[in-house]
Image: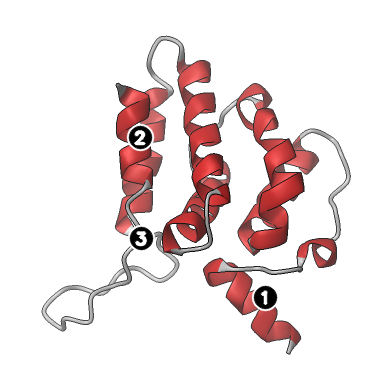
Amino acid sequence: RLATLWIYLCLWAPQPQPQDSTLPAWAPGSPPPIHAMLRAVLVAFTQLAGADDLCRTSVLALGAIAASGQGAIAAGAADLLVLLHKDGPMLPASVWMPLVPLLENVLAARYHSAGELLNRIRQRSGLPPIPMQSFQGNWQGQQGQQGQQGQQ
């Protein structure tokens, strides 16, 4: 049931900050609220029995969502993976390593954030990083668009 809840929440596209002047501005560099909530959910998952299996399932489901398409939800899932690896709970390599083939073969060519995540996982495992230029085929998503604009 928890994995199902996780998937439903991951399918919620990140929303931009509302342009309503009555609301306080988001802190610069802060993740979309749905991503902050999912980070907190993953932290809660780490406290449960069978945490590694639940967290691995959560990470792999997020990777599958990122690989499933080319829209805002898929790009948001790729960005969320990086956020969870950078600022989420410290998860063992056994949680992240099953995601590596998907990152190498699919996601890193689509999303700048996935290439970044792949190199973070490789470095944490003692492997050398892969040059980001080798991934830049068809980058999408917020970070991917920035990467493409910088090259033009």
Q: Amino acid at mark 2?
A: Trp
Residue underneath mark 2: 6
- Secondary structure state at the residue bearing disc 2: helix
Q: Quadrant of the C terminus?
A: bottom right
Query: Mark 2, residues whose alpha carbon is within 10 Å: few (<14), some, or many (≥20)?
Result: some
Q: CA distance from mark 1 to mark 3?
A: 20 Å
Checking the image for residue 147, the label placed there is 1
Q: Residue at x 56, y 42 (%)?
A: 63
The percent coordinates of residue 147 (x first, y second) are: 67, 75
Residue underneath mark 3: 14
Q: CA distance from mark 2 to mark 3?
A: 15 Å
- The answer to whether residue 77 of the structure is visible from this angle is yes
Q: Residue furthest bottom?
A: 152
Q: Is residue 90 above or below residue 118?
A: above
**2 or 3: tag closer to the N-terminus:** 2
Q: Amino acid at mark 3?
A: Pro
Number of callouts in the render?
A: 3
Q: Quadrant of residue 151?
A: bottom right
Checking the image for residue 37, the label placed there is none
In the image, is 69 to the left or to the right of 118? left
Work out whether residue 90 or residue 80 is closer to the camera in this orientation and state it. Answer: 80
The percent coordinates of residue 66 (x first, y second) are: 53, 50
Contact flag, marks 2 and 3 (Cβ < 8 Å) = no
Q: Residue at x 59, y 76 (%)?
A: 145
Q: CA distance from mark 1 to mark 2?
A: 29 Å
Q: Residue at x 58, y 49 (%)?
A: 67
Work out whether residue 132 or residue 140 is closer to the camera in this orientation and state it. Answer: 140
